[in-house]
């Protein structure tokens, strides 16, 4: 029983959230970098047909989708651990936005990535893809990942930065950086693929801070938890 209690407390720490955040960000970047490869939404039918004519084009898609599922599960763990550590000190409104935004973002990642994967899977199974259908489904994925997902990500960044400000869990420079990143995610109106990696990049930065930055309030809370466990 003491060993089990200690294990639960270990996985409820901010360090666990940081590790989960890094896993989520790296998994998303790896999966999206491969799934978004190929012709853009403005490509011609000839370019799309030529790209998907490769017989080995979709061999790794199922693996990439598994990576994305694991990354998204790690992201939800990140959300859960952060909320658990902040606890009752969190303002209800910002905590609700943080939680709801995390759930919504996870769903958008699943939808967008599934849409990106469809043409690859069809090419792998049937050996050919209708260029018009492929262009439409990839455009649908682009709208989800480049329009809706960044705005939801901005809500997560804004709310987590505000939670860090209200509870003292994050340094001021990171809070300011969060507001800048959130503003950029909202006002960005391009379909530029590298913009998909802004939110994962912010998650890595925040996770590294959680690993190495230990504010007094957080340290006190962790020490108190360990004392109660003993």
Image (spheres, grey):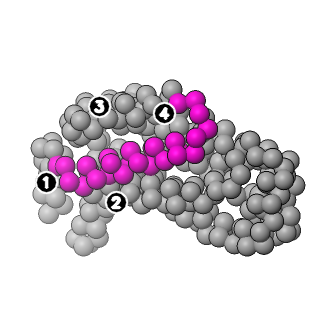
Mark nearest the camera among 4 and 2 is 4
Mark 1 vs 4, N-terminal side:
4
Measured in 3D between alpha carbons, the distance from the residue under mark 3 to the one under mark 4, in whole angstroms, is 14 Å
Q: Which mark is residue 81?
A: none
Residue ID at (66%, 66%): 61
State how far apart marks 1 and 2 are (Cα). 20 Å
Contact (Cβ within 8 Å) of mark 3 with mark 4: no
The range drawn in magenta is 188-214
Quadrant of the image containing the N terminus = bottom left
The image quadrant that residue 7 belongs to is: bottom left
Q: Is residue 192 magenta?
A: yes
Q: Badge 3 is on which residue? A: 176
Indicate the quadrant containing the C terminus: top left, top right, bottom left or bottom right. Answer: bottom left
Please state which of the two labelled residues, at mark 3 or mark 2, is closer to the viewer: 3
* Nearer-N-terminus badge (1/2): 2
> Closer to the observer: label 1 or label 2?
2
Circle 1 packing at 10 Å, graded few (<14), some (14-19), many (20+), is few
């Amino acid at each position: 029983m003491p060993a089990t209690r200690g294990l639960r407390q270990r996985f409820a720490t901010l360090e666990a959230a940081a590790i989960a955040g890094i896993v989520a960000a790296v998994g998303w970047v790896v999966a999206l970098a491969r799934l978004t490869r190929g012709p853009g939404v403005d490509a011609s039918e000839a370019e799309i047909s030529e790209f998907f004519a490769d017989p080995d084009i979709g061999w790794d898609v199922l693996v990439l989708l598994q990576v994305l599922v694991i990354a998204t599960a790690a992201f939800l763990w990140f959300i859960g651990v952060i909320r658990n550590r902040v606890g009752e000190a969190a303002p209800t409104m910002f905590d609700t936005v943080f939680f709801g935004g995390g759930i919504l973002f996870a769903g958008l990642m699943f939808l967008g990535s599934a849409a990106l994967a469809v043409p690859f899977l069809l090419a792998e199974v049937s050996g050919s893809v209708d260029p018009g259908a492929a262009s439409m489904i990839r455009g649908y994925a682009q709208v989800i990942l480049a329009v809706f997902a960044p705005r939801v990500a901005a809500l997560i960044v804004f709310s987590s930065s505000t939670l860090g400000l209200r509870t003292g869990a994050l340094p001021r420079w990171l809070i300011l950086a969060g507001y800048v990143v959130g503003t950029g995610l909202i006002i960005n109106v391009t379909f530029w693929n590298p913009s998909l990696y802004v939110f994962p990049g912010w998650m890595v930065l925040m996770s590294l801070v959680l690993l190495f930055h230990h504010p007094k309030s957080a340290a006190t809370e962790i020490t108190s938890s360990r004392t109660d466990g003993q």
